[in-house]
Amino acid sequence: MIRVAATGDLHVGPDSASAVGEQLRAVGDKADLLLIAGDLTKSGLTGEASALASQLRGIGVQVVAVLGNHDHHSDHPNEIADLLRDAGVAVLEGEGVRVDTPNGTVGVAGVKGFGGGFAGASGAEFGEPEMKAFIRHTKERSEALESALAELETDVRIALMHYAPIRETLQGEPAEIFPFLGSYLLAEAVDRAGADLAVHGHAHRGTEHGVTPGGVNVRNVAQTVIRQAYAVYAFERPSRDRESASVGSYPISEPTT
Ligand SMILES: [Fe+2]
Ligand SMILES: [Fe+2]
């Protein structure tokens, strides 16, 4: 069994880093790796990232993360990613990483993603330059996710993002802001490349469980949604059969923490 811990929206500030570190300290007893689905910091300050990095250093499992919109807020996303990488965190943006566990290999492809909305209520690359840039950014990040996923040759493949790929895991948020919470383009990327699980955050008032149109399980792991430090998803039947992987046929057990 491969056990994947996942959390998101830690929003760490210097005053809360030690509490978050305490929450995550024993993750190695319950999981083989830890995913963090963005918004690691409160305001995107390098001091916040340093405080979190010091807590994640030597945590005992590979930590894999993407940045969220909060991590971009102070215009230092690269510095934040570097601080975390120095602590051993694999910070992904349009790329993948392979993690070897005692029971198989896990590939994680990650992007921040972006908004735009969902079928029947989505933005288009049309009109003002600002609107075109908005949707173009989502398209580019979705394409990057698809490429990174397609390159993974591991027993289990996971798509990690901050923004949501489906509207189902946004339930609980006002429908008016769905276009700022995610995009169907991310789900299309996941379905085309195939994955066993798609993980996101960002929607603090959303819902944990969902599934893409192509049948890939989606989990919103924002801490306020999962109401615990992290959720653990266990993959019972890792296989190298990429065809079965693409239809989400690996049953994952529900959180055990
Ligand atoms: Fe957040
Ligand atoms: Fe966010």
Image: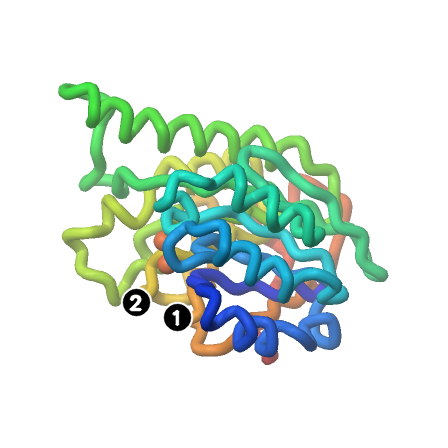
Residue 249, x across and y down, in percent: 61, 54
Q: Is residue 1 visible?
A: no
SS for callout 1: helix
Q: Amino acid at mark 2?
A: Arg
Taking depth in this image into account, of 234 and 65 the one nearest to the observer is: 65
Q: Which residue in the rendered view is the most extreme toward the right?
A: 102
Query: Disc 1 beta carbon < 8 A from ligand 1?
Result: no
On residue 205, the disc is: 2
Q: Amino acid at mark 1?
A: Val
Identity of the residue drawn at 56% across and 61% down: 52
Residue 220, x across and y down, in percent: 43, 61
Are the two marked residues, 1 and 2, in contact with CB atoms closer than 8 angstroms? yes
Identity of the residue drawn at 39% across and 59% down: 42
SS for callout 2: loop
The answer to whether 87 appears left or right of 79 in the picture is right
Taking depth in this image into account, of 207 and 53 the one nearest to the observer is: 53
Compared with 149, 218 (above or below) is below
Identity of the residue drawn at 24% across and 62% down: 173
Q: Quadrant of the N terminus?
A: bottom right
Q: Which residue is mark 1?
A: 225
Residue 245, x across and y down, in percent: 64, 46
